Every structure is written in structure tokens, then in C-alpha cells.
Amino acid sequence: MRTRTLSIVLFGTTALTAAVVAACSGSSSDVAPTPTPDGGGQSDTSTPPADGSPAQDAPLDTAAPGSVTFAYAPAWKGATKVEVYGAFGTATDWKQPFTTLADNGSGTFTGTAAVPPGQFPYVFKVTGDEAAAKPDTYARFTVDPGNPAFVPCPAESPTFDKNAPNPCSQLTAPQPAAASTYHFKGLVTTGGAPVAGFLVQLDREEPKSHHFFVNRVTTGADGAFDIVAATGSYRVQVLHPTYLAQTDAQRTSPASLAALRRSISSALLLSQDTTVSAAEVGYAGYGAMDPQGDAGTLPLPATFTFTVSPGTAGARLTLYGPGASIGDPWYAGPLKTTGSADFDGGFNTNKAPDSGLVPDAQYWWGTEQQYAKAEGGVGWTAQTMVLPVRFQ
């Protein structure tokens, strides 16, 4: 089944390959209350020209402006405002909304604006989410789900990240016919049974580009999700129902929740209606995780024990920096088929500071459970909730 949304010409196409995506920052492209780039952290740069040079905005034409239409349909409950930010040749580019969209009565926010011929980078800023701790003020930036064309966000944009290029959607004016969109479907289960209330987030996940928020739904009693987007490479994040409402430090009893913090799919090209393999979010292994508490400090090297979930290719030890919420791991160990791993105090990812481990500071630890990629589908990286730990 095909649907129609905002029409934008695809800036370019390249062959896309599916790749397993490691967990990224805790907040992804979400922000509360002031939007920041996806850290999460969340994978995505533009499709470059055929000669391999970076994509560039086309020079603006001096012809008279024409009318273009923007549209965004939040798939979650509680969105109250959608604004367009971009580089449209005005004095307030990226500093103030270029235009604010209005709900057309069906939950889709739409609006028109006059722009001269050319190509223009833009993003939406969406305010409101009933799943957040502050539902009225929670805000996030997002690329346009109905637009396959994108470029790296410029330095002036609020989503710019020099270390991990975030994508901005690219508007072409005069506006061409609407791009085709497709359904991205799947199922969330716990113990093999459908589960309600989990947050399913679609991220744009292009090669050489950081992943970035597109849209989100919440699973109902049937555990199913269905998100619509234009052609492109994407990943899915399945987030615990408390993901936006609580910090990691506030989830003081992971065992009572018996569920994963989140599960992230490998990248997948969406060019037709697609159903991905089920995401299993149940986890009964918290009782076997050791160390459990934060009563003392561990001598180094420290040994951690954990459960490797049935049906996985293995699990890896992960350690995260101090703070109420974790981001990307500072240490990611090798994939293990046995539930034991050692840590010598040396961090091994680019998220860790150069200063290294601070004795007696509170860190966090957990595991990533790696599910093998299903034939013709996706693989899932399942991230457990985390426990506090200190080192001598």
C-alpha cells in the first residue's frame, strides 16, 4: 500500500547496505525541554553527488517566490506544536521558526510558505509528548518522514554536530510531485507474547551520517507498530515505556521490570512496505547480574557476571559514565557466549574522556544482547537497564 505526503525530489541515490547498529546515546534526537541534536545519541549524512564530493545547497534563484507546503503527522499522543526551522534566506534563519504549522483536524500539522526557486535545508521542531516526564514542554527536532532528500545540517542549525553529522531534510522549490511513502511494520514481544506500551521510534540511518529522529508510535495490546516514511535507510528503536519519563538512576529495581531498556535494529533500506522481525524486550536476567549494588568499590581488574539471553549470538559487557542517564558506552567488551567478563579500568570507545577512570566515582554497567539478523530482516541489539558500580 502506498500513501502520499509532502513531496520533495530525492537529491541523489546510492546503494545502501544494512548494517548492525550499536546502541547510541540515551536521549537520541529527543530533548526536554530544549531540543539538542541526536546524541542519543541518536545514527546519517546526505547522499553525496556521483563524484563523491559533499552535497551542497543549490544557489538560490532570484526568480519570484512560489508556494510550498510542509506537513508533519506526529504518530504519538500529546504533540501540540510543529515548527519549521531552516535556511530560507531570511535574517532569522535557524534562530526562529520559518513558519508554524497548524493541525488540520486529523492530527497532521500543515502549512504553506513562499520561497524562491532553489534547495533549502530544514527540520521540524515538535513540542509535546504524553510519554515524557514533562509532556507539555518536551520537544524534539525531526527530519521530514515524507521527504527522501537530505543534506548535512549546516553549522548554524540547532542540530549541527561536527563529530557526527546530523541530517537535515532538503526542500526543492518549485515543489515537485509528492514522494511515495511506505509502511514500516513490526511486533514487540515479551516472552514471545505481544506487549503494549513500548515506545517505537524510527530513525533515519544513512551511511556516513548520524542517526536522527523521524517519528514514534506506542504499541497497543497487539504489540504491533506501523510507521510511514519515504524511501531511505532507517533503524528502529524499541524503548521501555519509562524511557522518556524517568532517568536511568530512577529505575532503581530493574528486576521488577523484567524488561530491556531498549532494543535497536540494524539499518534497513525502506523502498516498499516492509515488516521486520519481532523485537523481544523481556529480560529475566537481572537477578544473575553481579555486582548488584553500590555499597562499596571494586578492585581492578573487576569481574562482572550476567545472563546471555536464549536465542542470542552472545552478550557484551558495557560500562557508562557518571550521571543520572547513560549515553553511549565508554567501554564495550567483546561478544561473549558465557556470562562473565573482566574490566581492567581502561575505557575503549570515543565517548570516554581522555582523563580515564576516576576512583570512587559512580559509573553504570549493563550488557548488550546481540540477536542474529533474521533472513531478509534485521538484527537487534538489546540493551539491558543498568546498575551502579564504583572502582578503586
Image (cartoon, rainbow, N blue to C red):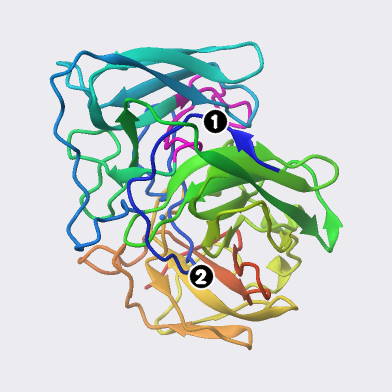
Mark 2 or 1: in front is 1
User: In this image, 391 relative to 18: left or right?
Assistant: left
Q: Position of residue 273 (x, y in %)?
A: 66, 51
Secondary structure of the residue carrying tag 2 is loop
Which residue is located at x 29 percent, y 45 percent?
Answer: 151
Res. 246 visible in picture: no
Residue sitting nearer the eye, 319 or 80: 80
Which residue is located at x 69 percent, y 43 percent?
Answer: 226
> Does 240 appear above or below 360?
above
Q: Which residues are magenta?
A: 126-147
Query: Alpha-carbon neighbours of circle 2 within 10 Å: few (<14), some, or many (≥20)?
Result: some
Name the image quarter holding the C terminus.
Answer: bottom left
Residue sitting nearer the eye, 227 or 187: 227
Of pointers 2 and 1, the one earlier in the residue sequence: 1
Q: Position of residue 83 (x, y in %)?
A: 40, 19
Res. 34 visible in picture: yes
Residue 142 shown in magenta: yes
Q: Which is the main secondary structure of the residues drawn in magenta?
A: loop
* Marks 2,1: beta carbons within 8 A: no
Q: Position of residue 180 (x, y in %)?
A: 55, 40
Give the number of the disc on residue 23. none
User: In this image, 182 relative to 154: left or right?
Assistant: right
Secondary structure of the residue carrying tag 1 is loop
Q: Quadrant of residue 338?
A: bottom right
> Does 323 appear above or below 37?
below
Number of numbered labels in the structure image = 2
Q: Which residue is mark 2?
A: 20
Amino acid bearing label 2: Val
Q: Which residue is mark 1?
A: 5
Residue sitting nearer the eye, 146 or 28: 146
Which residue is located at x 19 percent, y 54 percent?
Answer: 54
